[in-house]
Amino acid sequence: RKTTMIYYGIPMDQYRVADPLPYVVWVGKLEGGKGADWAIDCARKAGMKIVIMGPPYSSNHMNSAIAPRLGSDVIWLGGVNDAVKALVFSHATAFLSANVDGWVELLGIVNLESMASGCPIIAWTKEGNDKSAVLGDSLIEEGRNGFLVRYKSSASEWNRVVDEVAEILRTRIPTINREEVRKSVLTKFSQETMAKRYVWFYEHIIKN
């Protein structure tokens, strides 16, 4: 049954599927709660490079949690445009959609951009009342376009999550079909779908 929920729409033709290269990606504002430092530890545990994209919204967090981790296996590109972001996504083995404790991601357009590029997602969600939107919007179809990692608190489960994500990267991500990842967002989150939903909604209001 149709509802009034109208999701984000993205221009699917700006993203393409390509063969993966041995690196993962993290995208977002570099500030406490977004989990870039957690993603870095996960990538290193899996023996993979990680590309970080995003501006340093918090200089304290950047200087204390991110800068000390930078190196040949942790590459920070700073803020990037859509073309660079799409290129990095298209070749990334996976997108680590991390968050820490109180941060609840309200969908996150980068999740959709990653999937439109065929890049599967490993998404964090904290157990409890404030669940990540990757659950609320049924964004992740486990085994088809990514996997969910559930945790109780970053303080108590940091190391366990690092081990779990590293294992998913090594054994489960390689089983995902990148074309299927793209298809999983094509019908629900394309610009065309969003436009059709708005037309349906306006017609519904007019008729009622």
Image (cartoon, rainbow, N blue to C red):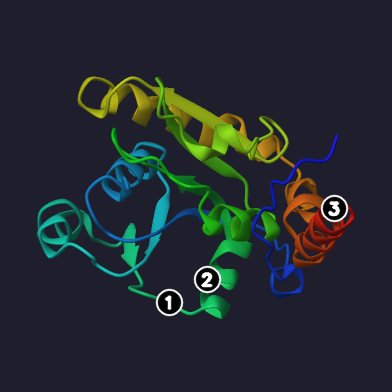
Residue type at numbered disc 3: His
Of badges 3 and 2, the one in the foreground is 3
Q: What is the CA distance from the residue labelled 2 to the residue labelled 1?
A: 6 Å
- Answer few, some or many: residues within 10 Å of disc 2's Cα (few below 14, many 20 plus, some between 14 and 19): many
- Answer few, some or many: residues within 10 Å of disc 1's Cα (few below 14, many 20 plus, some between 14 and 19): few
Q: Residue at x 40, y 54 (%)?
A: 49
Determine whether, in the image, residue 91 is placed left or right of residue 42: right
Q: What is the CA distance from the residue labelled 3 to the residue labelled 2?
A: 37 Å
Residue indicated by mark 1: 80
Relative image position of residue 205 (x, y in whole percent): 80, 55
- Answer few, some or many: residues within 10 Å of disc 3's Cα (few below 14, many 20 plus, some between 14 and 19): few
Q: Can residue 170 be spotted in the picture?
A: no
Residue type at numbered disc 1: Val
Residue type at numbered disc 2: Lys
In primary-sequence order, the first of circles 3 and 1 is 1
Q: Is residue 141 above or below residue 73?
A: above
Q: Secondary structure at mark 2?
A: helix
Q: Residue furthest front?
A: 208
In primary-sequence order, the first of circles 2 and 1 is 1
